[in-house]
Amino acid sequence: MQAVDSPAVWYGGELSKNRDWILQLDAGSRAELEAAAANVRARGISLEDAKKEDFDLPGLAPTLAAARAELGEGRGFVMIRGLPIGDYSADEIGAILWAIGAHLGVGVSQSTDGDRLGHVIDRGATDRYYTAGGVIEPHVDPVDVVGLLCMRSAPEGGASRIISAQAIHNIMLDECPELLEHLYNGYHYSRRAHGGTVTEHRVPVFAKSDGAMQSYLLPMTIRQAEEEGYPLAAAEQAALDKITEIASRPDVYLDMEFQPGDIQFLNNRVIFHARTDYRDDPDPELKRLLLRIWLMMPDWPARAKDMNFIANTDRAGGGFIPDKVAVA
């Protein structure tokens, strides 16, 4: 175990003092997105089939290329601001988000239902993070990059909290290396939300691949695996608790107060994300709502071997194959 030295090691207390991680859309960029999305919709191309070349964004493309580089080689996150969602229909917003995503990576399905655009909203469900309300613990999404577009913010609270996973690694190496060892050893994960069984092998929270440190953490499915016969030792639970404790330190986390139209992209290999508690609107039509896109990055280095345990992938090495698709 060695300290990680990379641009993805950052501390929220420092980054909160500036806003260079926000990319502002200007009028020309918005016009390009509108035209590109309208063209795809007019041609009858589905989101499932739409690719980068279907969205002509000559003016915005360099900015998105820089965002892509920041995701893969920099801090691991960006926010795009300035999309006036009140001017568009739901279908137009979805096409615009897909256009941006197509210039960053390859969009994949987020469940066996085949949904390309997930709706992060409190539905009272507890088997997936994006269907539950209230506080969400630090975790990753099982895909290279997740994008979240704010459709409606909560009347109060509900900040998106992001944390450098590699900063947590370094802090634990300094404060409690004996607990960090358990995170290298990993945990069994349940796959029951997708019709699967518990992983036969342990999935590490931290592992190196091609010399780069990567992370993977889904505490919800670790708890589900416990229910299915894979209990945690006290030290293993303590290691998970330590992640949550460090991620709650104001000098470590960075909170983003979503405004309608904000789009956040996160590299799940180096970023843990969470959510603060919030008060939702009692009107179901006005509840906090984010539109989610999952992206795979085919040209990135391969995931650490033991972090690949979802066999039935949709495309580009990720996503869930919809139930309606026959698997060879």
Image: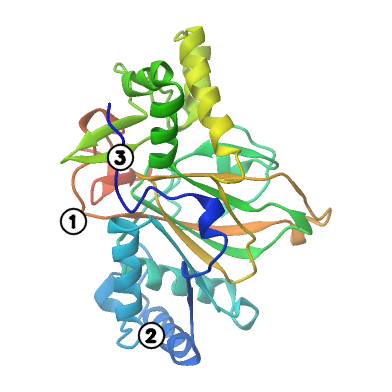
Image coordinates of residue 25 in percent, x first then y, are 48, 81
Mark number, residue 39: 2
Q: Which residue is mark 3?
A: 4
**What separation in Å lies between label 1 and label 3 (alpha carbons)?**
22 Å
Image coordinates of residue 151 in percent, x first then y, are 63, 66
Q: Residues within 10 Å of mark 2 (few under 14, many from 20)?
A: some
**Mark 3 or mark 1, which is nearer the start of the sequence?**
3
Q: SS for tag 1?
A: loop
**Mark 2 or mark 3, which is nearer the start of the sequence?**
3
Tell me the quarter of the image containing the C terminus: top left
**What separation in Å lies between label 3 and label 2 (alpha carbons)?**
45 Å
Image coordinates of residue 43 in percent, x first then y, are 35, 82
**What separation in Å lies between label 1 and label 2 (alpha carbons)?**
28 Å
In-image side of 64 versus 272 (left or right) = left
Mark number, residue 114: none
Q: Residue at x 51, y 76 (%)?
A: 92
In-image side of 94 versus 135 (left or right) = left
Q: SS for tag 3?
A: loop
Q: Nearer the viewer, residue 237 or 122?
A: 237
Q: In the displayed image of the protein, which residue is found farthest to the front?
A: 174
Q: Residue at x 81, y 56 (%)?
A: 281
Q: Is residue 272 in sight in this rendering?
A: yes
**Mark 2 or mark 1, which is nearer the start of the sequence?**
2
Q: Which residue is mark 1?
A: 299
Disc 3 versus disc 2: nearer the observer:
3
Disc 1 versus disc 3: nearer the observer:
3
Q: Are marks 1 and 2 in contact (CB under 8 Å)?
A: no
Q: SS for tag 2?
A: helix
Residue kind at label 3, given as amino acid type? Val
Disc 1 versus disc 2: nearer the observer:
1
Image coordinates of residue 308 in percent, x first then y, are 27, 33
